[in-house]
């Protein structure tokens, strides 16, 4: 990858990051987030990635911010989520094996657990533009680049 270039959606449209940006010294994973109606992004099952940079634009507030994944979620929080997802996949496999044995209608009913990484607790925690750490997080992202 040449310096000062980028690759859009290097792993496809449904996998992070949205871009790899190549500086003279680093390859930077960048995820773009936006919302029409909220002051925080939705991460869905992709979660929040340590080492990724995020740009979030909100039409609701007509604002944009930049931050790093590690300033939103801690390694310990991510580890707990990862362990839970792993356990849920094991439970789903066992459930689907049981469902097959009682599928008298021959319909192939199965269960698929989909992780959903959210934020809650009201605007104090979720508003990326009025959050007490907004300036700190922007500065950390910019300084680290």
Image (cartoon, rainbow, N blue to C red):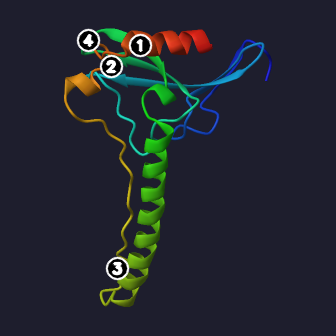
Judging from the image, what secondary structure is the residue with disc 4 in?
A: loop
Residue at image x 55%, y 36%?
Answer: 16
Q: Which label was assigned to residue 61?
A: 4
Judging from the image, what secondary structure is the residue with disc 2 in?
A: loop
Judging from the image, what secondary structure is the residue with disc 1 in?
A: strand
> Along the line of sight, which residue is nearer the eye, 43 or 10?
43
> Along the line of sight, which residue is nearer the eye, 40 or 2?
40
> Along the line of sight, which residue is nearer the eye, 73 or 13?
73
> Can you say which quadrant of the picture contains the N terminus?
top right
| Residue 37 visible in the shown view | no
Look at the picture and state if 83 lies above or below 26: below
Check the image and name the residue furthest to the right. Answer: 2
Residue denoted by label 2: 128
| Residue 51 visible in the shown view | yes
* Separation of residues labelled 1 and 4 (CA atoms): 11 Å
Q: Which label was assigned to residue 107?
A: 3
| Mark in front: 3 vs 4 | 4
Work out whether mark 4 precedes mark 2 in sequence or the reverse, and give the earlier one. 4
Work out whether mark 1 precedes mark 2 in sequence or the reverse, and give the earlier one. 1
Residue denoted by label 1: 65
Badge 2 local density, few (<14 within 10 Å), some, or many (20+)?
A: many
């Amino acid at each position: 990858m040449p310096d000062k270039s980028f690759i859009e959606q290097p792993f496809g449209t449904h996998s992070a990051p949205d871009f790899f940006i190549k500086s003279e010294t680093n390859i930077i994973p960048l995820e773009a987030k936006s919302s029409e109606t909220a002051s925080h992004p939705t991460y869905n099952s992709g979660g929040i990635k340590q080492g990724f940079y995020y740009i979030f634009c909100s039409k609701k507030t007509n604002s944009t911010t930049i931050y790093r994944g590690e300033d939103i979620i801690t390694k310990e929080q991510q580890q707990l989520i990862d362990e839970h997802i792993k356990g849920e996949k094991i439970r789903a496999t066992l459930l689907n094996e049981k469902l097959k044995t009682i599928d008298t209608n021959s319909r192939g009913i199965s269960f698929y657990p989909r992780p959903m990484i959210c934020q809650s607790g009201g605007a104090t925690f979720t508003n990326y533009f009025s959050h007490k750490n907004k300036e700190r997080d922007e500065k950390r992202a910019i300084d680290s680049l």
